[in-house]
Image (cartoon, helix red, strand yellow):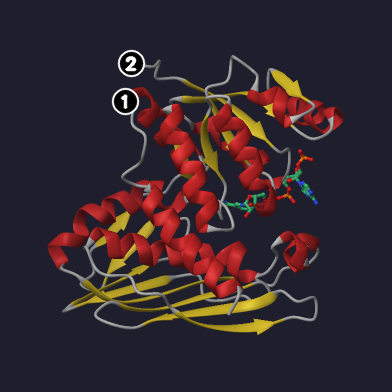
Amino acid sequence: MESRLCRWGIAGAGAIARRFCHDITRFARQSKVVAIAARESARADTFAADHGVARAHGSYRALAEDGEVDAVYVAVIHPQHGAVVRLMLEHGKHVLVEKPAVLSVAEWDELTTLAHARGVLLLEAMKVMCFPAWRALWAQLPERGQPHHLEAAFGSQVTGDGKLFDAALAGGANWDVGVYGLWLYAALCRRFSLPACPPVVMRKMGPSGVDLQSWYRFEGAFSARIGAAIDEDLPRHARLEGEGWGLEIVGKWWNPQQIRWDDGTEILMPVEGGLQFEADHLAELRAAGALDSPWLPQAVSRQVIGWLAAAACA
Ligand SMILES: NC(=O)c1ccc[n+]([C@@H]2O[C@H](COP(=O)([O-])OP(=O)(O)OC[C@H]3O[C@@H](n4cnc5c(N)ncnc54)[C@H](OP(=O)(O)O)[C@@H]3O)[C@@H](O)[C@H]2O)c1
C-alpha cells in the first residue's frame, strides 16, 4: 500500500494554482505541495517563494521527471490540459486535472486508457463533489426519492480575463462554467441510474466568436435547466425537486456548505478553503490503489465532455 501522504506537484503557476496551493498548505490532511512548474523558471521561482514550495521547475517535463512527486495538479488553461496530462501520466504520475478536463471525448478516452495502463489515477477536479456538505446530501437523497427537476446556473460578469473571450483558447461560458451544472446533472443521473440524454442548447454569442451564455435544457423523467454565463451574474443557488420534496443549495452551489430542505431540515457544514477536499480524495484513492473515483467518476467526466463538445458546435 502507498504512503497516505500524497506529495503534489502543480503544473502551471496561475490563478487557480495559487488557490490550490493555499488550500492544501493550510487545510489538507493527506496532501502536501512539494513542487511547482511553470513554462518559465522565473514564474515557478516566484510561486515557490510566495507559497513556501520546496522545488521550482522551469518546465512541465522537469516536473514529470521529479521522482519526489506522486501526483500532479494540472492547472494550465483548458486547451493545454491534454498535453500536460499525457506527459504526467507517461511518467507515472497520478493526475488531478482542472475542469474542463479536456476538449474531446476521444482525448479523454485516450488519456483514461493510458492512466489505467500505467496504474495511476486520472480525475477531473470537480470540487463540488468532494465538499462535506455534498457528501452528506448524497447520503440523504435516496431516502427522499428520485429527483424530477434541477435548476442550476453559474454565471458572472467577467472583466479582464482575456482567455475567456478568445475562441482560439476555448474561451466562452460553455467550456468555462457550463461544465459545473452539467456535472451536477450527470452525477445525479448516475446516482439514481437515470438515463442522461443530451441537452437542447441555446447560446448567446459574443463579438469575439465565443458564447457569452449557454443554456442547457434536459427533458424527460429528470428534467433540468442549466445556465452558464460570462457576461452576467446569474442566481447562485441551485434547486432540486422530487415527488413531495425540494431543496436549495444555498449561496454558491458550487461551494456547497448549506443545503436547506423545503421541510425545514438543513445540512450545515461550513468549510475553510475548499480545494483540499479533492486533493485529499485523490490521496485516499491512491493509498487504496484505486484507479477511479466514486465521487469523480471518469465516466461522468466523459459524459460531460461530450455534452460540452457538442454544445460548442451548436
Ligand atoms: N476549480 C475552480 O474553481 C477553477 C477556478 C478557476 C479556473 N479553473 C480552471 O483552471 C484552469 C486554469 O485557470 P486559471 O484561471 O488559473 O488560468 P490562468 O491563471 O490564466 O493560467 C494558468 C496557467 O496556464 C498557462 N497559460 C496561460 N496562458 C497561456 C497561453 N496562452 N498558452 C499556454 N499556456 C498558458 C500558464 O502557465 P505557466 O505558469 O506555466 O506559464 C498559466 O499560469 C482552467 O482550466 C480553468 O477552467 C478552475
- Secondary structure of the residue carrying tag 2 is loop
Residues at marks 1 and 2 touching, judged by CB atoms closer than 8 Å? yes
Tell me the quadrant of the picture where the C terminus can be found: bottom right
Residue at numbered disc 2: 1
User: Residue placed at 48% from the left, 30% from the top?
Assistant: 28
Is residue 28 shown above or below 102? above
Q: Quadrant of residue 165?
A: bottom right
Tell me the quadrant of the picture where the N terminus can be found: top left
Residue farthest to the left, as pictured: 143
All told, the count of numbered labels is 2
The amino acid pointed to by label 2 is Met
Let me know if residue 306 appears in the view: yes
- Secondary structure of the residue carrying tag 1 is helix
User: Residue placed at 52% from the left, 24% from the top?
Assistant: 92
**Could you tell me residue 120's position as x and y percent?**
44, 30
Distance of mark 1 from mark 2, alpha carbons? 7 Å
Horizontal placement of 19 versus 31: left or right?
Answer: right
Residue at numbered disc 1: 288
User: Residue placed at 53% from the left, 72% from the top?
Assistant: 310
**Badge 2 local density, few (<14 within 10 Å), some, or many (20+)?**
few
Let me know if residue 256 appears in the view: no
Is residue 12 shown above or below 249? above
